[in-house]
Amino acid sequence: MPESPPPAADAPRARPARTTGTRASSRRGTTARSAARSGKVLPPPVLVEVRRGELVESRHRGHVVQVDASGRLEQGIGDPEIEVTLRSAVKPFALVALVESGAADDLRLSHSELAVMAASHTGEDMHVRTLQAVFRRAGVTQALLACGTAGMPLDQVTATRLARQGEAAGPIRHMCSGFHAASILLSRYSDWSLEDYDRPDHPSQVACRSAVARAFGQRPGALHTAVDDCGLATFAFPLVDIARAFALLADPAGVASDPARSAMAPALTRIRDAMLASPEMVGGNGEVLDTRLMRAKPGRLVSKSGAEGLRGVGLLPGARGPTSGAAGLALRIEDGDGFARAARSVTVEALSQLNALSDQELRSLSAHHQPQVRSAAGSVVAQSVPDFVLAPISELV
């Protein structure tokens, strides 16, 4: 594993972590890596403690890795080489297939329309109306959507309203309906069959798989493939490769290091810009961290979560200071983060330690930095607290 380069003379100094017990957590990460070299099996380091009063009620373990624009590992904790599934974090990269085909130009897709196709949205009316407009222009029916309806919409206000009106949520309110729509539109533009667009061997899925492979510098046949809950493919990669892919998304023209990736730069730039311009389409108007991050630091952070405690964040040039280059951040919560609290907490804390969030920006994200549980009377009864320090990779090897 390469040693991290020395900091530039004008590089900003890292701020101390805002939690307690961080030095112990850093040692845990170092010990875990040392144990791996010796053949011992130890659990990943604790990243978040859930505190209820004076008690530590539970702990979330996991891994964090940050790379620079060249893909070199700079800071992290845990195992950067652990293989994890991208789940919905695959969407911005797979969407390249639609843009490169010419379909996005043919349909004159707006930023909002393209962003919702890279989204795990909350099923609000704005998401539905945006997709319906695209379906109408393309002359296809939303009845083609094969993503299902289970557990949707995610937005509770919308779900309550639909229930009160006796209306069942359709597939278009599914969090992955935009991603499915992209495959339908690609198929319509390319004169491929529409009804079976979700088959793994369908040309639209082959095209998406090829786009993901190029973004990650692999051959399509070498990808470790799995099926996401919505029925479309997702892929597994080492966590550090996910960080590298998000560095590419942050600065496609500046980071691309080979002809295949360089050729993707225009499409990735268009997708990135759509996500940055319409963050509410990537998540929703509520407390969705991907949306809140991009709103808190507009034009500097591009974020996409995946299920089971995964998130990738692309840091655009200037995100960590006026002279900073692009970077990529990826994290994975080992237990899958069923309560959707640990990944949010770790994401905000890691960005803070990387000097990517000002004090004001950090305060604006406090609900995600230290998620709280309140009693029926409104009192805080429990809180998730990040408890780790990102260390230079050279200290962990």
Image: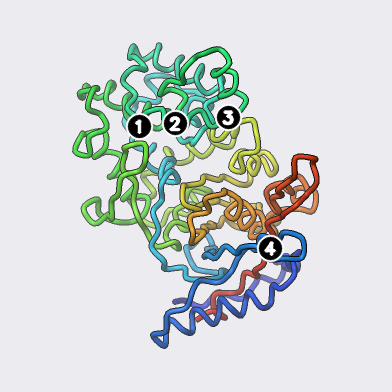
Q: Are marks 2 and 1 in contact (CB under 8 Å)?
A: yes
Q: Do the numbered discs 4 and 1 sit on residues whose CB atoms are within 8 Å? A: no
Work out whether residue 203 or residue 233 is closer to the camera in this orientation and state it.
Answer: 233
Res 41 visible: yes
Q: Residues within 10 Å of mark 2 (few under 14, many from 20)?
A: many
Q: Which mark is drawn over residue 98?
A: 1
Residue 81 image offset from top left, x and y in percent = 42, 68
Task: State which mark lies toward you, 1 or 3.
Answer: 3
Whether residue 368 sits left or right of residue 239 in the image: it is right
Among the two numbered marks 4 and 2 on one chain, the one whose residue lies closer to the N terminus: 2
Check disc 1 and give the amino acid type: Leu
Q: Which residue is disc 4 drawn over?
A: 353
| Residue underneath mark 3 | 155
* Disc ID at residue 243: none
> Who comes first in sequence, dot 4 or dot 1?
1
Please name the residue shown 65% across and 52% down the image.
319
Image depth: mark 4 or mark 1 in front = 4
Q: Earlier in the sequence, mark 1 or mark 3?
A: 1
Tell me the residue that label 2 is attached to.
117
The amino acid sitting under disc 3 is Asp
Q: Quadrant of the N terminus?
A: bottom left
N-terminal of the two: label 3 or label 2? 2
Amino acid type, residue under disc 4 in the picture: Gln
Query: Between 140 and 297, which is closer to the camera in this rendering?
Result: 140
Give whichever of 99, 342 is nearer the camera: 342
